[in-house]
Image (cartoon, helix red, strand yellow):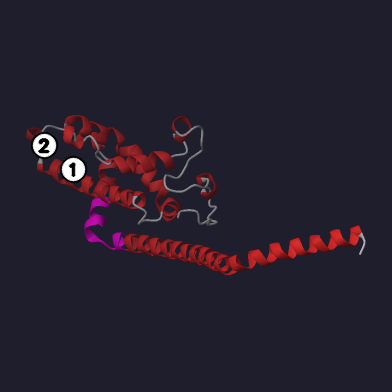
Amino acid sequence: MSEEQFLKALESLEIGGGAASFYPWLSPLAIFLSAVFAFFASWRAINTQRRIARKRATLDVLFRLESDAAFLKAAEVFQDVRDGRGFMSLVKDKKGKSNRDKEEELYVDMYLNHLELLCVGMSEDTIDELFLFQYMRNTVVGDWRDVEDYVKDCRERSPKNHRLFQKLEKFATAWDRQRTGDIFDGSDCCFVTRKDDASHYLDGNSETRHTQD
């Protein structure tokens, strides 16, 4: 056997020995990789179910609001005050308030409480932000513009109300394409709980991209 043939034989033995030494690790490695793949498959399935459940919950909440007599009455009074004497007319000392003032203030606050509750639900990931953005963006943004001075006056009048309708303000400001430029780094408008571009869904574009996990 020549020296060259000997070296080749030795090299083949070393390679074979290395492979043989690797065999005991194959079974644990296969188990580990299977566990990793199973974890990611399960994680993906859970997130899919969460998205479906969140959208169903959102649809159910909106459906209930549309058929709730108290909410519809509150929305009606809210519109009447907005289109009539304005919300600042409700900002009076208790002694100077008429029964009409008290009733209208009650319904206006009830209406805003419903919007605040929706925004809290979005913050807590139980209400789908994209769903509400596409369905109620104009309402949320427009209503906040109308009541912003009224709400801020109520906050100043009572220290315990310094966080009054805070979530509503946060979402309405983020969704307002005329105001987010100064607040959110020049963005046209933005989501609060999502990572994608909110402007993609403006102007009738309703293509859905599932990124809220």
Q: Residue furthest left?
A: 95
- Which residue bears the numbered disc 1? 105
Q: Left or right: 48 with respect to 143?
A: right
For label 2, the crowd category at 10 Å Cα-Cα, with few meaning under 14, some 14 to 19 and many 20 or more, is some
Q: Quadrant of the N terminus?
A: bottom right
Q: Residue furthest right?
A: 2
Q: Is residue 65 magenta?
A: yes
Q: Secondary structure at mark 1?
A: helix
Q: Magenta span covers which residues?
A: 64-76
Q: Quadrant of the C terminus?
A: bottom left
User: In the picture, residue 14 is in which quadrant?
Assistant: bottom right
Q: CA distance from mark 1 to mark 2?
A: 10 Å
Give, as a three-letter code, the residue at label 1: Glu
Tell me if label 1 and label 2 are in contact, CB under 8 Å.
Answer: yes
Magenta residues, dominant SS class: helix
Q: Is residue 66 above or below residue 182?
A: below
Q: Is residue 141 magenta?
A: no
Q: Is residue 152 above or below residue 113?
A: above
Looking at the image, is mark 1 or mark 2 earlier in the sequence? 2
| Foreground pick, 134 / 54 | 54
- Picture coordinates of residue 59, whole percent (x, y): 37, 62
- Which residue bears the numbered disc 2? 97
For label 1, the crowd category at 10 Å Cα-Cα, with few meaning under 14, some 14 to 19 and many 20 or more, is many
- Picture coordinates of residue 138, whole percent (x, y): 41, 46
Give, as a three-letter code, the residue at label 2: Lys
- Picture coordinates of residue 204, whole percent (x, y): 53, 52
User: In the picture, residue 159 is in which quadrant?
Assistant: top left
